[in-house]
Structure formats: structure tokens, C-alpha cells
Image (cartoon, helix red, strand yellow):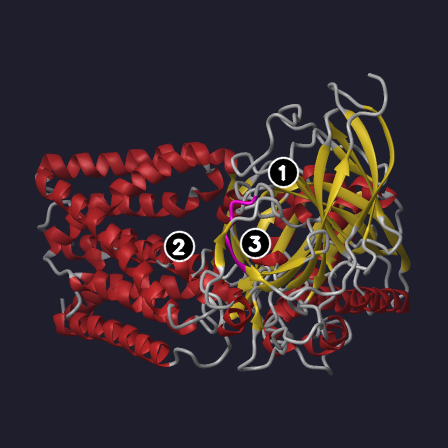
């Protein structure tokens, strides 16, 4: 062998595996990039984020929650635009209600209300099935909703315009539905799928959402039998990060979107969202200034490409077997039948077990060292997870937004710091080839357990450990083979590459998604992923010059230190701390209260609460809530109490009676809350709609609902001035209910109330998360007394 050839071979075997792993991670990370926004003068048939901004400015100029005048204005814009594009339009005015799920502060969230969905229909050449493009147009009261869901709304309008520019008719009907009341509890989605005749024509649902203000669009949820519709997604040519791991995990979470209602109806489809910038989600900073134009372009490209493709597809062929899917690189989606996971898992297990057994028998792996390296890996994983979590928690003390969101404004530097720390830890440990092989072999032990568990319990997430396990098992055969002969160095390099590349390609890009999806509060999960990838890459990294290692370790530590110093130096600067200060008026008592759900009230809230506020639950006002409020006496205001008129009573089921109430807010509040103080409620319904499912036990005044079982509380949204009718199944004994109305913002009188500005240095309303959803409001409460049964049993 010539000297240049020998030098090249030496370089390849020494640095090739590390270079291959780095390249694999870099290529895989390209799947997390969004397209560049196209300009105003882009071709008519193309989606243009610049053109879509016109709609976004109309939609997101102010908060527009369900039932507000701002929502009426947004709805008028949507109708006018759809008509201008030549679609048949209507407004579905309906009442919907259902049990959404258990709240983190106690009661099950029961939501109902009047919604007004905007529906557009573009007839196809073959009447029958339809493609549904869907998002919601309402926002939370706390912010203008520029990203959630102004960006998807603008994207769908511009996508339909570009589709119309094709100048041809699709085979299938196209439905465009902008739902109302999604933020209130999926009310618009429930009304459309449960009540509208067009819902019966839907063949596939494409829902567009946001759980943040920036980042690429992810396809995070698919409908049943997702294989065929995923084929269409993969063939659109539009890059998207889609993963069956997200889909599998999301199915087990309490989170929900309008797509959840479509899935309950058995419809195939896809759910899209961008999730970066969570710290501005559901709050006043979800505004036009913080819109990511790349995310807007990404939503629009996907909506347009899928509408074109599915608009001419046979929608009857869109259900099949479920698939396991994940991105390989930008624009390439790997797919395999979920039914193949057990066989692949068994194959990987045979490869791994054979390689491990062979190495132990030959003595190229030492059993005691392997056990020791396994224990060391577990200790490092625990320490790394704790260190990563402690690091972000320490930085969070200087970031007011961290307490509620667990995230930072502009969190990219924090992610880089966490990645730097994790990489430094992975590179710090040295050892010869034998020790590196033992570390990689030890890392296969948790992969083995995880792969076996995922194959049975979570097949959609199995790819995450299955391919690294198969690669590491293959690497074991090569790394622990006879270390003599002319090809030994090449064999070792191939084994190191096989062990490192799958882990680098799948685990390292995942760290960014874990950071955004689980928030920096759980940054330790990403550290564990880096550490596991680092152990599997130990043979690949063994050939690096010690100086390279030391430089990389020092660089990671310096990066983390620099980010920490910069973040901590900014303590108290920038956005004021979020606050939740509410005024609760109790006309029956002639009293009022200040309420704050902040763990540490802001200076403005402290000025209202005084020096010695009480702290604890308020069971007579919020029955079943397990949350402690700061509260103190407040000035009374001249506001009328909400009213409940008993319109009738009739025998009910299970020994109960049915009581019909007309609930109204004389001051025009659009939200009402009705809660049971003495007992539970067996069933309920709104405006003669369907009855809810019965509760697990028949309500009894002798077994009042409390924090232990969450109590019973119904929130009503979009309440008209004329009121809304609610029917309850109650026990025969006298019953007390608490009725409360809610208006956004503090009352403006009398003098002495804290200033209500929102600029820097004043106050910053907390986002609509957890119990803070109901904060920053003027509340008026009344007691509704229902006498004992008046009819014979």
C-alpha cells in the first residue's frame, strides 16, 4: 500500500465514523427547517406569506374571543373573503357543549355555548365526498391570537386563493371551515361534526393549529388508518417534520384540538402545528410583532399542496393500516407498516443478542466491565437530567415568563447552552478502543428494554430506539471481532459508524423537539438523549485527538457559562412579570375581593392586596377547586349580579328532578360559570341539546362535592344578552348553585383601582394557561337557591 493511500485509510478509519455521525445529525436536522417566505409578487399559483399577511392584520389586530364584537368583525372578514374567492358560504349558528377533561386545579372542565362557524364550500366535478381544510378563528381573551390561530387562518385564505388561480375544478368538494369556540373547549368543532349536514360528506380532515409563535410546522397527529393519507403527505414535495412518535404520545395526552372531534367520528386526516416560542403562547405577546413568516409560509405550502393532491384523490381509499413514520432528512419521510414492528424488533434483538454473546464468549467484552459501564451510564443519565433541569430552572429565576410557560423568550441560546453542556459531558470521558466498545455495548441495554416496551405499548414511537438498537447490535459484531488482520481497522470503523449514525440521526434532532415540546423546564430529557447518543458514539469518538476533545468540552462549557451570565444579567429587564389580578364583586354580601393566582404577586397586585392578604382556597366561590388564591377586601363596584330564573321543573331519572334555568348577565358578560355548592349534578344540557353522560354517582345533598372529586362546574361561552337555558338533573332536596359572570379586564370604577395599562413598566396579563385562564377579569357572583322538589314523585 502506498504512503498516500495508507494515510487516507488511516484518516478514514480514525475520523470517518465521527464525521459520518456528525453528517447524519446535520442532515436529519434539516427536517426542522421551514421554507423561506415568498414575496408579494410570487406567481399567482404559489402560496405567498407576504400576501397572506393582509388577512393576518385583519384577524389579529386585537383579542377576539368567542362572543365578542371583535370576533364578529373577524367573522365578517372571513365571509367576505370566501365569497370573493367564489365559495358558497354560510354561518353555522349553533349551541354545543361537552365534558372536555379534568382541569389541573380540580373540576372537570364542562364547556358549552353559542358558536358561529364560518363555512365555505367549493363544489367539485364529482359530487359526494369532500376535503376539509380547518382551523379556528377565535382567540383567548388574553391576547390577539396572531399565531393561534391567526397564522393558520391567513394561510388557508391565501391557499384557497392560490388554488383558485389554477383555473380548474377539483374532483372532490373542498370545504373550508373556520370554527368558533375552540379555545373555549372545542365548541365549534363539536357543533360542526355533530350537527352540520356537510360533516357527513367529509372524507379527509386537514387541521391547522399553533402551540407557539415560531418554528417549522410539525405533523403531530394523524387520524385512524393513517397509512394512505401519509403517502399523500410524503408525495406533496413539501418538507414537513412528521413523526409517529408525536402521534402515539399525543393520543395519550389530555391536550385536544378540533381534530380530536374529527377523530372521534372516525375520519382520516392530519393535524399540523408549529410549537416554537411557547413563552408567548395564549398571551398578549402572541401578536403581529412576533409572527414567524416562515411558519406562515409552511402552513400555506402544506394546505395548498394537500388540497391539490387530495382534491383529485379517491377519498374512499384513504383508510388502511397504521404506519410508523419519521423524517430522514428535509423532504423525505420514512414509512413502514406498524404491523412490521414486532418482526423488526425480533430481528434487531437477534442481531444484538448474537453480537453480545459472541463478544462475551471471545472475551473481547468483559462482563464485569459491561455491568459497570451500564451502572455508570445510568448514573450519568440521572445526573445529566438533574443538571439540565437545574440549569434551566436557575435561568428561569431571571425570566418572569418561565414560571407559567416553563419557557424563555428567544430560547435558542438556552437550547444551545444545554446542548453544549450535554455534549461536553459526552466528550469528556476518554478510553481506548476496548473501553469505548464496552460503553457502546452498555448503551444497548436501555435500548433493548425500551425497544421491547415500545413495540408492545407504543409502536409509533418504536423507531426512535429500534434503529439505533439495530445499528448498535450490528456494530457489536464488528467492534468486538478479532482485532488482528489487515482489515481490522476498517472493520472497527464500520462498527463504530453503524453504532453511531442511527443514534445521531434520530436522537440528536429529537433534542430540539423535546426542548420545544416539553419546554425547557424538562431540559433534562434532551440531555439524556445526547448522553445516550454519546455512549453509542464512543467508539467513533475514540479516534479523536485529545486536543480536539478538550477544545470541544471547553467550548461547550464556555457557551453555557456565557448564556447563563447574559441571561442572569438581564434579570428584571424587558417584559414585566405576568400577573393575574381579578376583582370579584359579591352584591349579596355588599363586599368585594381582590384575587391573585400568582405564587408571588406583582408589585401592582401587591398594591391592591395590601400587606397582609389571606392565602387559601375559596370553596364557597370556587367549589371543588384545589387552588389557593391570594385574596383581600376590595372596593365595591356598582355592578349587577348575574340572574338565574327557574323556568320549570319535571321528574328526572334515577330519583332526580330536572330543573330548567334561564341564565343571564345584566351587564352583558359573554361568559358565565354555574357551579354546585351542596351537591353534584347528575346530568346537564344546554338549549334543549343532548343530555350529558350521567355522573358516576347519583348526587346527594348529604355527600357534597368537594376538592376530592373536583365538584361540578359548567362554563358557558358566547352568552347572548337574552341569556342561555340550562337544564340540570338535581336531587329533590334544596340545592344551592353559585352563578358567576366574567368580563375581561378590571372594572373602571371606583377610584382607587390599580391602573390597567399594558405597556412596559405597567403590567403584563398572564397567559391563558392553567387557572390563569380565568384571571385578569371583573367577576360578579350570586347564589341561586333552588327549593325542594315541587312535583310529586
Identify the magenta region: 625-631
The magenta stretch spans residue 628: yes
Q: Residues within 10 Å of mark 1 (few under 14, many from 20)?
A: some
* Residue corresponding to mark 1: 225
The magenta stretch spans residue 609: no
* Residue corresponding to mark 2: 506
Q: Is residue 225 above or below residue 747?
A: above
Quarter residue 210 falls in: bottom right
* Residue corresponding to mark 3: 771
Closer-to-camera residue (265/663):
663
Task: Determine the residue located farthest toward the top in the rendered image.
Answer: 793
Task: Determine the residue located farthest toward the front in the rendered image.
Answer: 590
**Numbered disc in front, either 3 or 1:** 3
Q: Which mark is residue 213?
A: none
Label 3 to label 1: alpha-carbon separation: 36 Å
Report if residue 676 is visible in the image. yes
Label 3 to label 2: alpha-carbon separation: 37 Å
Is 46 on the left or on the right of 219, as rendered? right
Is 449 on the left or on the right of 76, as rendered? left
- Looking at marks 3 and 1 on the same chain, the residue that comes earlier in the sequence is marked by 1
Residue 552: x and y, percent?
22, 72
Closer-to-camera residue (474/53):
53
Q: Residues within 10 Å of mark 3 (few under 14, many from 20)?
A: some
Q: Do the residues under discs 3 and 1 have CB atoms within 8 angstroms?
A: no
Q: Residues within 10 Å of mark 2 (few under 14, many from 20)?
A: many
Q: Dot 3: what SS?
A: helix
Q: Is residue 553 above or below residue 243?
A: below
Amino acid at each position: 500500500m502506498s504512503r498516500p493511500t495508507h494515510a487516507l485509510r488511516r484518516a478514514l478509519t480514525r475520523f470517518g465514523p465521527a464525521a459520518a455521525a456528525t453528517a447524519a445529525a446535520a442532515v436529519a436536522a434539516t427536517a426542522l427547517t421551514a421554507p423561506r417566505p415568498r414575496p408579494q409578487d410570487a406567481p399567482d399559483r404559489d402560496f405567498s406569506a407576504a400576501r397572506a399577511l393582509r388577512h393576518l392584520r385583519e384577524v389579529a389586530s386585537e383579542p377576539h374571543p368567542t362572543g365578542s364584537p371583535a370576533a364578529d368583525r373577524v367573522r365578517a372578514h372571513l365571509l367576505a373573503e370566501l365569497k370573493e374567492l367564489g365559495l358558497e358560504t354560510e354561518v353555522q349558528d349553533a349551541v354545543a357543549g361537552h365534558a372536555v377533561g379534568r382541569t389541573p386545579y380540580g373540576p372537570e372542565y364542562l364547556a358549552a355555548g353559542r358558536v358561529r362557524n364560518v363555512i365555505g364550500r367549493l363544489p367539485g366535478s364529482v359530487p359526494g365526498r369532500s376535503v376539509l381544510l380547518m382551523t379556528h378563528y377565535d382567540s383567548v381573551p388574553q391576547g390577539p391570537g396572531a399565531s393561534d390561530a391567526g397564522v393558520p387562518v391567513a394561510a388557508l385564505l391565501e391557499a384557497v386563493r392560490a388554488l383558485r388561480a389554477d383555473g380548474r375544478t377539483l374532483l372532490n368538494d373542498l370545504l373550508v371551515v373556520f370554527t368558533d369556540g375552540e379555545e373555549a373547549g372545542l365548541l365549534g368543532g363539536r357543533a360542526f361534526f355533530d350537527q352540520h349536514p356537510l360533516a357527513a360528506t367529509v372524507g379527509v380532515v386537514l387541521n391547522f393549529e399553533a402551540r407557539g409563535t415560531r418554528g417549522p410546522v410539525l405533523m403531530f397527529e394523524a387520524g385512524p388508518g393513517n397509512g394512505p393519507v401519509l403517502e399523500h403527505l410524503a408525495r406533496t414535495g413539501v418538507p414537513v417534520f412528521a413523526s409517529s412518535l408525536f402521534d402515539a404520545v399525543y393520543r395519550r395526552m389530555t391536550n385536544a384540538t378540533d381534530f380530536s372531534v374529527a377523530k372521534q367520528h372516525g375520519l382520516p386526516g392530519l393535524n399540523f402545528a408549529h410549537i416554537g416560542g411557547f413563552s408567548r403562547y395564549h398571551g398578549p405577546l402572541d401578536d403581529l410583532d412576533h409572527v414567524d413568516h416562515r411558519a406562515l409560509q409552511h402552513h400555506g405550502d402544506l394546505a395548498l399542496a394537500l388540497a391539490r393532491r387530495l382534491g383529485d384523490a379517491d377519498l374512499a381509499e384513504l383508510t388502511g393500516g397504521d404506519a410508523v413514520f419519521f423524517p430522514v432528512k428535509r423532504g423525505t419521510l420514512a414509512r413502514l407498516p406498524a404491523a412490521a414492528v414486532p418482526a423488526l424488533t425480533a430481528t434487531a434483538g437477534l442481531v444484538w443478542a448474537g453480537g453480545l454473546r459472541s463478544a462475551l464468549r471471545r472475551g473481547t467484552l468483559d462482563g464485569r466491565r459491561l455491568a459497570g459501564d451500564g451502572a455508570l451510564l445510568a448514573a450519568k443519565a440521572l445526573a445529566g437530567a438533574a443538571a439540565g433541569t437545574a440549569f434551566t430552572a436557575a435561568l428561569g429565576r431571571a425570566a418572569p415568563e418561565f414560571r407559567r410557560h416553563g419557557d424563555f423568550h428567544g430560547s435558542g441560546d438556552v437550547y444551545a447552552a444545554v446542548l453544549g453542556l450535554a455534549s461536553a459531558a459526552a466528550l469528556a470521558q476518554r478510553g481506548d478502543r476496548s473501553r469505548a466498545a464496552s460503553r457502546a455495548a452498555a448503551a444497548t441495554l436501555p435500548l433493548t428494554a425500551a425497544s421491547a416496551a415500545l413495540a408492545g405499548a407504543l409502536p409509533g414511537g418504536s423507531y426512535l430506539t429500534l434503529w439505533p438498537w439495530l445499528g448498535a447490535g450490528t456494530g457489536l459484531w464488528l467492534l468486538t471481532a478479532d482485532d488482528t488482520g489487515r482489515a481490522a481497522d476498517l472493520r472497527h470503523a464500520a462498527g463504530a459508524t453503524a453504532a453511531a449514525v442511527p443514534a445521531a440521526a434520530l436522537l440528536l434532532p429529537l433534542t430540539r423537539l423535546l426542548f420545544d415540546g416539553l419546554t425547557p423546564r424538562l431540559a433534562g430529557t434532551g440531555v439524556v438523549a445526547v448522553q445516550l447518543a454519546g455512549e453509542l458514539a464512543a467508539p467513533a469518538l475514540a479516534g479523536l485527538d485529545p486536543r480536539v476533545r478538550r477544545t470541544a468540552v471547553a467550548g461547550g462549557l464556555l457557551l453555557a457559562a456565557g448564556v447563563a451570565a447574559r441571561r442572569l444579567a438581564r434579570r428584571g429587564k424587558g417584559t414585566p412579570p405576568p400577573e393575574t389580578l381579578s376583582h370579584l364583586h359579591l352584591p349579596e354580601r355588599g363586599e368585594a375581593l381582590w384575587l391573585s393566582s400568582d405564587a408571588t404577586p406583582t408589585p401592582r397586585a401587591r398594591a391592591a392586596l395590601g400587606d397582609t392578604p389571606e392565602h387559601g382556597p375559596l370553596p364557597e366561590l370556587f367549589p371543588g377547586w384545589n387552588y389557593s388564591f391570594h385574596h383581600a377586601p376590595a372596593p365595591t363596584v356598582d355592578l349587577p349580579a348575574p340572574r338565574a330564573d327557574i323556568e320549570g321543573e319535571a321528574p328526572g331519572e334515577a330519583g332526580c328532578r330536572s330543573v330548567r334555568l334561564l341564565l343571564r348577565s345584566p351587564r352583558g358578560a359573554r361568559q358565565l360559570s354555574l357551579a354546585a355548592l351542596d351537591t353534584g349534578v347528575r346530568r346537564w344540557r344546554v338549549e334543549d341539546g343532548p343530555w350529558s353522560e350521567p355522573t358516576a354517582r347519583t348526587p346527594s345533598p348529604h355527600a357534597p362535592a368537594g376538592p376530592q372529586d373536583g365538584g361540578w362546574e359548567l362554563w358557558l361561552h358566547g352568552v347572548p344578552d337574552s341569556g342561555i337555558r340550562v337544564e340540570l338533573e338535581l336531587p329533590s332536596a334544596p340545592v344551592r348553585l353559585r352563578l358567576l359572570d366574567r368580563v375581561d379586564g378590571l372594572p373602571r370604577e371606583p377610584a382607587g383601582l390599580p391602573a390597567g395599562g399594558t405597556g412596559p413598566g405597567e403590567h403584563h396579563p398572564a397567559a391563558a394557561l392553567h387557572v390563569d385562564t380565568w384571571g385578569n377579569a371583573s367577576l360578579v357572583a350570586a347564589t341561586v337557591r333552588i327549593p325542594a322538589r315541587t312535583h310529586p314523585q
